[in-house]
Image (cartoon, rainbow, N blue to C red):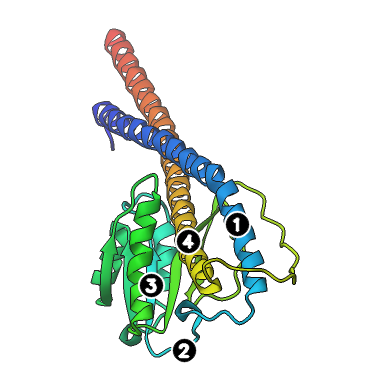
């Protein structure tokens, strides 16, 4: 049976843990809002680029580019995006479960985030490259990953590139998703975190003149499409991580507070019992 001293010690220890989880919850909430704001602030440029790209691709019907080449898939690259840290519930586990579905013999992994690299090493899969990205993903970080994946595809070392990451839906919901990346298929606008989806633009058939050439213009647009696509994926993954961590820390704080209340109740009952026993002993001594 616990003594009052033991109960006080446990209450003090759990109270300290609750304070830590509460602080982590507040930090995660702040970082999550920053990730959403960054995506929304960049949305106008992304929408303009997609509008130009859709208009250009409908006019250059005979355009061909190595990034559009569809080949039989003998070897695949997976861009695996996960968190740098744990304490975010089942977020990383769900992403890794989806990434583990690919054949290890014919799949190489490009990781973003320490947990992703640890998963590849732990499961003895092939790691092609490891990249880091911060709490506020930047365009150069996305461009470095895109450059490496694009080179693998253009050199013929892989025939397909897919992205496995978490998609931010709302504070309570994050989805592990697999996104087709290379070869580039039909160009579509991507959903921006916190913003309404862009309506599809009608196809236009008017003739157009490309300067210096259709190949140069569309190759430039394709390069930016790949980088922006991955950039928003990083933003969404980071928003998912911070959201999942905030919810996880809130649940931990609530559980700690419930446990503290239960221990306080037990402590008060035990203390009251001790007081009652001492009063009875005093009364019994006086009666004798």
Residue 168 shown left or right of residue 137 in the figure: right
Residue 39 shown left or right of residue 197 in the figure: left
Pointer 3 or 2: first along the chain? 2
Pointer 4 or 2: first along the chain? 2
Image x and y of residue 176, in percent: 49, 64
Discs 1/2, front: 2
Could you tell me if the residues under marks 4 and 3 are in contact, i.e. CB atoms within 8 Å?
no
Pointer 4 or 1: first along the chain? 1
| Label 3 crowd bin: few (<14), some (14–19), many (20+), radius 10 Å | some
Q: Which of 249 and 101 is in front in this view?
A: 101
Discs 1/3, front: 3
Q: Is mark 4 on a helix, strand or loop?
A: helix
Question: Which of the 4 quarters of the picture holds residue 186?
Answer: bottom right
Image x and y of residue 212, in percent: 52, 67
Q: State the CA–CA distance, disc 3 to disc 2.
A: 15 Å
Image x and y of residue 205, in percent: 75, 72
Pointer 1 or 3: first along the chain? 3
Q: What element carries label 1?
A: loop
Residue 226 shown left or right of residue 8 in the figure: right
Quadrant including the C terminus: top left
Instruction: Look at 33% across and 14% down and name the residue there.
Output: 279
Q: State the CA–CA distance, disc 4 to disc 3.
A: 12 Å
* Residue 82 visible within the image: no
Q: State the CA–CA distance, disc 1 to disc 2.
A: 28 Å
Discs 4/3, front: 4
| Label 2 crowd bin: few (<14), some (14–19), many (20+), radius 10 Å | few
**Can you tell which mark lies on residue 224?**
4
| Label 1 crowd bin: few (<14), some (14–19), many (20+), radius 10 Å | some
**191 relative to 34, above or below:** below
Q: Nearer the viewer, residue 62 or 128?
A: 62
Q: Can you identify the residue that label 2 sits on?
A: 71
Q: Can you identify the residue that label 1 sits on?
A: 191
């Amino acid at each position: 049976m616990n003594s009052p001293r033991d109960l006080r010690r446990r209450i003090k220890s759990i109270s300290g843990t609750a304070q830590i989880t509460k602080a982590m919850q507040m930090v995660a909430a702040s970082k999550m809002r920053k990730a959403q704001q960054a995506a929304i602030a960049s949305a106008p440029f992304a929408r303009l680029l997609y509008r130009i790209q859709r208009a250009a691709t409908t006019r250059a019907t005979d355009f061909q580019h190595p990034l559009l080449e569809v080949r039989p898939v003998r070897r695949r690259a997976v861009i695996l995006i996960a968190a740098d840290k744990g304490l975010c519930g089942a977020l990383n586990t769900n992403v890794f479960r989806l990434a583990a579905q690919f054949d290890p013999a014919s799949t190489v992994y490009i990781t973003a985030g320490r947990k992703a690299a640890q998963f590849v090493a732990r499961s003895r899969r092939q790691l092609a490259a490891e990249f880091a990205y911060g709490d506020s993903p930047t365009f150069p970080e996305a461009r470095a990953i895109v450059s490496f994946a694009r080179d693998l595809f253009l050199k013929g070392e892989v025939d397909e590139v897919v992205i496995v990451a978490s998609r931010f839906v709302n504070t309570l919901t994050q989805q592990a998703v697999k996104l087709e990346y290379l070869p580039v298929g039909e160009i579509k606008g991507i959903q921006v975190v916190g913003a309404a989806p862009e309506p599809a633009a009608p196809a236009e058939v008017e003739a157009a003149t490309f300067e210096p050439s259709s190949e140069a213009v569309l190759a430039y647009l394709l390069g930016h499409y790949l980088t922006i696509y991955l950039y928003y994926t990083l933003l969404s993954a980071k928003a998912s991580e911070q959201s999942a961590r905030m919810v996880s820390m809130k649940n931990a704080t609530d559980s700690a507070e419930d446990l503290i209340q239960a221990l306080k109740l037990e402590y008060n009952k035990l203390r009251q019992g001790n007081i009652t026993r001492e009063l009875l002993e005093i009364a019994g001594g006086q009666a004798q």
